[in-house]
Amino acid sequence: MSAPVLVMEAPVGVPATAIGRLAEADLSTVVMPLGSSSSTAAGIASEVLRALGKNLDANGKARHGLDDVSLVPTWLTAHRTRTLIAAAPQHATIDNLFDLASMCAASPMTLVLAVDHGYATRVVADLRPVLPAVTPWPRITEADEIPATADANDWNPAVPSVLPTPIS
């Protein structure tokens, strides 16, 4: 099973990073910039974990960067993330995009690549092995700029019982 991969192209004159307005406070929709700065799978994983609010320096000890790769699906699932949006990924390498898709494949969510205008055709062609689908750019209104607040009856991400339990 793999996570669906969607590609959406920003309209003319709108930067792909405008998609950041769709991020949700409960982490059901997470938006992260993805440029050419992270050149390894471990670097991409660190960016995803940072977008989920993880402080990678909190443990105070040196770790192998590939540890972050194995943590990505766990934390996406633990936070019940339904959509991970990578904004402006058209300058990342094709290997980086495959790494991101691979990390997301083990989690029950959708990966959306929000590209700048003029890049969708190339990104879809490059990612053909993961069968990406093209989806339209969402209508983003001023109301979307205000972060949604969770109702009292909604899931509370601070409750530890929803986090994964270690298998003994």
Image (cartoon, helix red, strand yellow):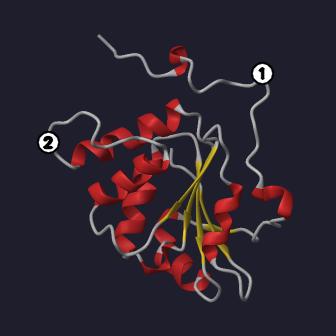
Q: Amino acid at mark 1?
A: Ala
x and y percent of residue 70 in the render? 31, 41
Question: How dense is the environment of label 1, judged by Cα within 10 Å: few (below 14), some, or many (20 and up)?
Answer: few
Which residue was labeled with disc 1? Answer: 152
Q: Amino acid at mark 2?
A: Ala
Q: Is residue 107 left or right of residue 82?
A: left
Q: Nearer the viewer, residue 150 or 100?
A: 150
Give the distance between the C-alpha atoms of the residues marked 1 and 2, in whole angstroms. Answer: 39 Å
Question: How dense is the environment of label 2, judged by Cα within 10 Å: few (below 14), some, or many (20 and up)?
Answer: few
x and y percent of residue 94 in the render? 39, 74
How many numbered tags mark residues here? 2
Q: Nearer the viewer, residue 164 or 20?
A: 20
Q: In this picture, is 24 found above or below 127? A: above
Whichever of labels 1 and 2 marks the residue nearer the N terminus, that label is 2
Q: Is residue 54 left or right of residue 160?
A: left
Q: Secondary structure at mark 1?
A: loop
x and y percent of residue 79 in the render? 55, 33
Q: Secondary structure at mark 2?
A: loop
x and y percent of residue 6 in the render? 62, 63
Question: Which residue is at 34% across, 72% downward?
Answer: 37
Location of residue 92 by image quarter: bottom left
Residue 32 is marked as none
Q: Nearer the viewer, residue 49 or 1?
A: 49
Screen quadrant of the C terminus: top left
Location of residue 109 by image quarter: top right
Q: In this picture, is 68 found above or below 75? A: below
Which residue was labeled with disc 2? Answer: 62
Question: Which residue is at 45% across, 36% downward?
Answer: 75
User: Do the residues under discs 1 and 2 have CB atoms within 8 angstroms?
Assistant: no
Question: Which residue is at 64% across, 62% downward?
Answer: 20
